[in-house]
Amino acid sequence: ETRTQVAWGVEVEWPCDFEALCSSKSLLVDVVSLLAAPQLECSESLCIPSSALSSPTVLSTSPDEGLVTGGTTVMLRVKDLPAFSPDDVQASFSVGGSKFLARVASLVQEPGSSLRASSGVITLITPGVPSDVTDV
């Protein structure tokens, strides 16, 4: 029985760079739709204009007060927040006319949420407020 060595070749077919495709047209990638139906071929149907995104609304806050030393965990119920990662969110609050950034600990969007319409909860950790800030 004769044996022969076989040489194999493997090629990689890179999927479309949707980020480059959409940004070249000043559009955003609809990541949720792309994850729901992955595609290898480029298609502008997965690109959306920023004008199609709704403005986020805070529906409720719990609690609505905390320690001036910081460290309070706050949950915001939000609507139409076009984000799916805590890294994509920046949350601020005002005390005595000063604005402070809170640390975003988590973001959980409800099933069926998209960049165009969503409902979810952001969990924040408040920073300390300087002692010279009044009207807390």
Image (cartoon, grey):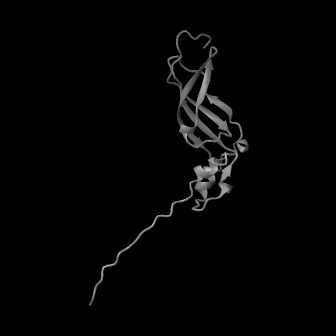
* Quadrant assignment, res 51: top right
Q: Is residue 62 above or below residue 24?
A: above
Left or right for 57, reference 1: right
Q: Pick out the residue farthest to the bottom.
A: 1
User: Which quadrant would the N terminus be assigned to in this image?
Assistant: bottom left
Q: Is residue 124 above or below residue 37?
A: above
Count of numbered tags: 0
Name the residue located 62 percent from the left edge and 32 percent from the top edge.
Answer: 76
Q: Pick out the residue farthest to the front.
A: 24
Q: Pick out the residue farthest to the left.
A: 1
Choose between 46 and 62: the one closer to the eye.
46
Choose between 68 and 114: the one closer to the eye.
114
| Residue 79 image point, x, y percent | 68, 38
User: Which quadrant would the C terminus be assigned to in this image?
Assistant: top right
Name the residue located 67 percent from the left edge and 32 percent from the top edge.
Answer: 58
Left or right for 76, reference 52: left
| Residue 64 image point, x, y percent | 62, 24
| Residue 66 image point, x, y percent | 56, 21
Name the residue located 65 percent from the left edge and 58 percent from the top edge.
Answer: 43
| Residue 61 image point, x, y percent | 63, 29
Left or right for 102, reference 10: right
- Confirm whether residue 29 shows in the render: no
- Confirm whether residue 10 shows in the render: yes
Choose between 115 and 47: the one closer to the eye.
47
